[in-house]
Every structure is written in structure tokens, then in C-alpha cells.
Image: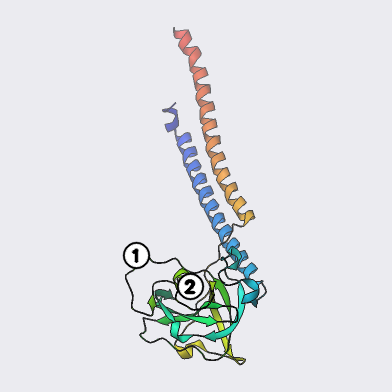
Amino acid sequence: MSAGLFRPRWIGLFLILVSVVVACTLLGMWQLGVAQDKGRAEAVSAAAKLQREPLEQVTRPHSDFEADFSNRPVSAVGTYDARDQILVVDRRLDGRVGSWVVTPLRTAQGTIAVLRGFTDGTPTTLPDPPSGTVTILGTLGPGESPQVDAAPLPAPQRPAIDLAALVNEWPGQLYNVVLLASSESVGGTALDPSASGLSRVPPPGLPSHLNIQNAAYAVQWWVFGLFAVWMFVKIVRAEWLAERQHVAPKEEAHA
């Protein structure tokens, strides 16, 4: 059988099989990528359609962070406490290296960590937040895990937005969420973050599902590839059996 496989016809069929399997594999991977992209787009679209609600109608201080809180649009009203601001270092934004400015906002129900923006480098002096009653529009995100192996940093620098640590440092009842500010206004007047050297931080990517239709197309291409392998093996085996049946009578006649 092995000698028969080196005939030009079988070599040609084998090369065709390899081409078909490679093509099916690549097409399946492409469709899987399309399924992921469409699923991500659907998740973003669904989040964008959520109605913006006041923070206190979405969650309460010390409540668990729910999965559907990610990128949830909310509004919050309160006053900033500049004394407890922190600077979360070693962050990236559009290729720039810098830090996040996080300020506690005191609301009627509790305190929430507001990620006001990104600033280049590691400034020694933090920009002053607006005074008075501030209205913030933004999206919710989770706190970050503590960096247990991080070297000690001088105040007010931090390696992460560790809400488990801040709950013991900031007075009042702390919300177990982070508010990523997209706009701030005082007395109805919108504030420009660039005036304080800040750039808004976009919300993190949403966990997304696969688009079922395109995922099915991916599986379909891979099944086609397996089917081609099965057909090749079946044809080779059938010809090998036919050759054996043809050779056996000759061997018996010579015997």
C-alpha cells in the first residue's frame, strides 16, 4: 500500500487534500474571529442602549459588583474630596505612559471612587477637582485587585484602584464600583478636563459572547476539512483493498 501512495495520482490527490484542509482551517478561524467581533459589537451596542440612571438607583454602598454593572451608564451628584485623591501609576492611554487621577465623590448615600482622567507621567501635585456640587456622567467598572508584590509607593501614589483598601481609608460608606467619568459639570456648565491636564479614560472592553451564526460557520468549515480527510482515507483504503483482491488470485495461481 505504501508504494502505491507514491504514485503521481495519489501524490496529487494528497496535495489537494492538504490545500483543502489548510483552506478550511483558515476559513474556520476567520469565521471564528468574525463571530468574536460581532459578539463584541453586540455587547457594546447593548450597553449603549441602556438608559442612564442615577447611581443610587443602580447599586448601594458595600453591595457586590454585579456582572451587568460593567459599562453601565449612570449619573452621580456630590462633592469631591481633594484631600483623599490618589494617583494610580503605570497606566497607558493611546501609547502614552502616565497615571490615573482617582477622586472620592461624596454623595448623599455614600462615597464613590471617580476615575476623573489620565495624566502624563507621575505628577507630584494632583490637579484640583472642581469645587461645589458636581454632576458626573459616566460608566461603571469594577475595582482592581491589590498588587501584593508591588513595591511601596509614596502617597498619594497607588499601584491599583483597590477598593478593599480604600474602604478603610476613606470616610463614609463606600460604593463597590468605580465611576469612569465621561463628563463633569457644575451648575449646568460642562467642565473641560484638559484644563487640568487630564484626558478621559474610555471604559474597559466588555466581556462578549460569540455570534452564534458565524461560530456555526466556523465549525462548518472545520467539518468540511475533516470530511475531506475521511474521504481521502476512504478512497485510498478502497483502492488498496481492490489491489489486494486483484493480487491474491495471481498469487494462488502461481502457488
User: Alpha-carbon neighbours of circle 1 within 10 Å: few (<14), some, or many (≥20)?
Assistant: few
Q: Which residue is mark 2?
A: 167
Instruction: Provide residue 89's location: percent of width, then percent of height.
Output: 39, 76
Q: Which residue has dot 1 on it? A: 149
The amino acid type, in three-letter code, at marker 2 is Val
Compared across the picture, whether 164 is left or right of 68 comes to: left
Residue at the spot 49% in from the left edge and 19% down from the top edge: 244
The kind of secondary structure element at disc 1 is loop
Residue 190 lies, in percent from the top left, at 58, 90
Q: Amino acid at mark 1?
A: Asp
Q: Position of residue 123 (x, y in %)?
A: 37, 84
> Is 231 left, or right, of 168 in this rendering?
right
User: Which sits in the foreground, 44 or 30?
Assistant: 44
Residue furthest out toward the top: 255
| Callout 2 crowding tier (Cα within 10 Å): few <14, some 14–19, many ≥20 | some
Q: Quadrant of the N terminus?
A: top left
Closer-to-camera residue (51/157): 157
Q: Give the foreground label among 1 and 2.
A: 2
* Residue in the image at 42% along x and 79% along y: 86
Q: Is residue 31 above or below residue 244?
A: below
Q: Secondary structure at mark 2?
A: loop
User: Residue 224, image x and y in percent?
Assistant: 57, 43
